[in-house]
Every structure is written in C-alpha cells, then in structure tokens.
Image (tube, rainbow, N blue to C red):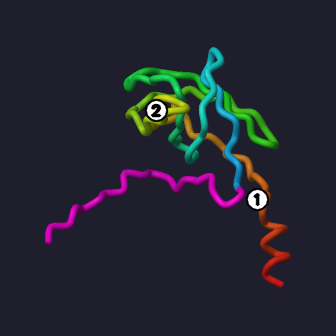
Amino acid sequence: MVRAVTLDRRRASRVAYVNGLLPPTAVMVPGRSAVVVNLSPLGMLLETDWHIRPSRLVEVRLQFASATLRVCADVLRAYVSALDTRRGLRYRAALTFSAPIAMPKEPDLLESYRQLTVR
C-alpha cells in the first residue's frame, strides 16, 4: 500500500469557521462578496461564485462583529471547488496578506448552548 505524504504548508494556525463560530463578512473591493472558509493572521481561504485568478493583488474588507479590517492580499492559488446545479460554479482562493493582521476575538455563538447541554 502506497501512502501519500501531505505536507502542511501553513505558517500560522488558522481559525476554521465551524460549530457555531461565524466567519467575518468578506468583500473584495470594489464590492464582490465572498465566504471566509478559514483565516489566519497571514492569510485566508475564501469561497465565491466568481473566478479569482492567481498572481493578482486584491483588497479585502473583513467585517468582524467587533471591527472592520481592510487588507491587501496576493492570490496564491485558485480553483473550482464545486459545481452545483442551483448555485453554479463555486471557486476557492488562497490569499496571503501583505502584512500580518491582528485578528479580533470573536464570540462563540453556541457556547452558552453547550454549557446548558453539558449540565
């Protein structure tokens, strides 16, 4: 049996938006919306319904519950992530920020529910 070795290229830990943790709203300037899949101080993975080309510089506005950040980023990789009959093509793009960002602490919306169910 041959096993593929997967190298983790991550230079910083990422926040994955699952289990009640909502992602910030992302808008690519001049106004195209995107969904943040995961985010780190150095970059992010986002998904959108429009094609993003690699090797381009983009500006992204991230709207957190507590702050708004505008960041410049370079598109490292982009690919088709899904083909849905209702939503059409979905694209994902890996971006690296020009400068590290300070990520605000976001509330876990399911934490109070989890505490109630544990008792």
Cα gap from disc 2 to disc 1, whole angstroms: 27 Å
In x, y percent, where is residue 86? Answer: 54, 32
Task: Judge by depth and name the residue closer to the eye, 11 or 35.
Answer: 35
| In the image, residue 65 above or below residue 31 | below
Residue at image point 60% right, 23% down: 28
Image location of residue 2, percent across then percent down: 15, 67
Position of residue 22 measured from the top left corner of the image (x, y, whole percent) = 71, 49
**Extreme-left residue of the structure:** 1
Q: Is residue 114 above or below residue 48?
A: below
Question: Would residue 29 appear left or right of 63 to someone viewing this image?
Answer: left
Q: Say which quadrant the C terminus sits in.
A: bottom right
x, y (%) of residue 58?
A: 52, 22
**Which residue: 82% across, 75% down?**
115
Tell whether position 19 is magenta. yes
Q: Is residue 37 above or below residue 63?
A: below
Tell me where residue 101 sits by quadrant.
Answer: top right
Count of labels in the image: 2
Q: Which residues are magenta?
A: 1-20
- Mark 2 or 1, which is nearer the eye? 2
The first of marks 2 and 1 along the sequence is 2
Taking the view exactly as shown, the residue that stands out farthest to the top is 30
SS under mark 2: strand
Residue on which the image places disc 2: 91
Q: Give the number of the disc on residue 108.
A: 1
